[in-house]
Image (tube, rainbow, N blue to C red):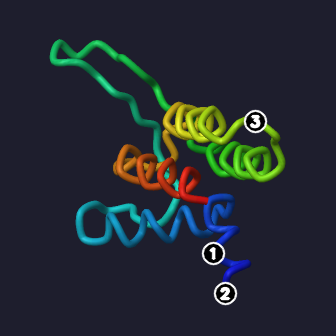
């Protein structure tokens, strides 16, 4: 059990499971990577951020998790880099911030 818990911050399946638990009943797509393009806009409709095209999301998240598991960066910098990159990818249609904060905490806890 301990080995499995140690792998959670680096597991794509755990990330999807966490999103599914947190988002179930709140949105259409939960526990899966998003299937459509998304963007963040301001009050005037100007795009502030355009998420990665959906077809690239799974591979980018897997690559990020693999990097996270093997890098030697100081943990506080490490967790910030992971958080930034995950938010930049914008893995889910909604709920990225909540999952991102959870993952940031899990990495620091580990």
Q: Position of residue 90 (x, y in %)?
A: 49, 39
User: Can you say whether 14 is above or below 65 in the image?
Assistant: below
Q: Position of residue 52 (x, y in %)?
A: 56, 33
- Quarter assignment of residue 77: top right
Alpha-carbon span between mark 3 and mark 2: 26 Å
Which label's residue is closer to the chain start, 3 or 2? 2
> Which is more toward the observer, 42 or 100?
100
**Label 3 with label 1: CB-CB less than 8 Å:** no
Q: Secondary structure at mark 1?
A: helix
Identify the residue at image location x=67%, y=87%. 1
Q: Which residue is mark 3?
A: 73
Q: Which residue is mark 2?
A: 1
Q: Report the side of 15 relative to 72 (left or right).
A: left
Q: Secondary structure at mark 3?
A: loop
Which label's residue is closer to the chain start, 3 or 1? 1
**Label 3 with label 2: CB-CB less than 8 Å:** no
Alpha-carbon span between mark 1 and mark 2: 6 Å
Q: Which numbered circle lies on residue 95?
A: none
**Label 1 with label 2: CB-CB less than 8 Å:** yes
> Which is more toward the observer, 71 or 45?
71
Alpha-carbon span between mark 3 and mark 1: 21 Å
Q: Secondary structure at mark 2?
A: loop
Looking at the rendered image, the quarter that the C terminus falls into is bottom right
- Quarter assignment of residue 15: bottom right
């Amino acid at each position: 059990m301990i080995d499995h818990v140690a792998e959670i911050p680096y597991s794509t399946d755990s990330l999807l499971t966490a999103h599914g638990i947190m988002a179930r009943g709140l949105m259409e797509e939960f526990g899966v990577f998003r299937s459509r393009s998304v963007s963040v806009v301001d009050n005037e409709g100007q795009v502030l951020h355009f998420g990665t095209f959906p077809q690239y999301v799974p591979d980018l998240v897997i690559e990020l998790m693999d990097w996270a598991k093997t890098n030697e960066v100081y943990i506080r910098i490490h967790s910030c880099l992971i958080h930034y990159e995950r938010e930049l990818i914008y893995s889910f249609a909604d709920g990225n911030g909540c999952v991102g904060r959870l993952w940031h905490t899990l990495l620091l806890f580990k």
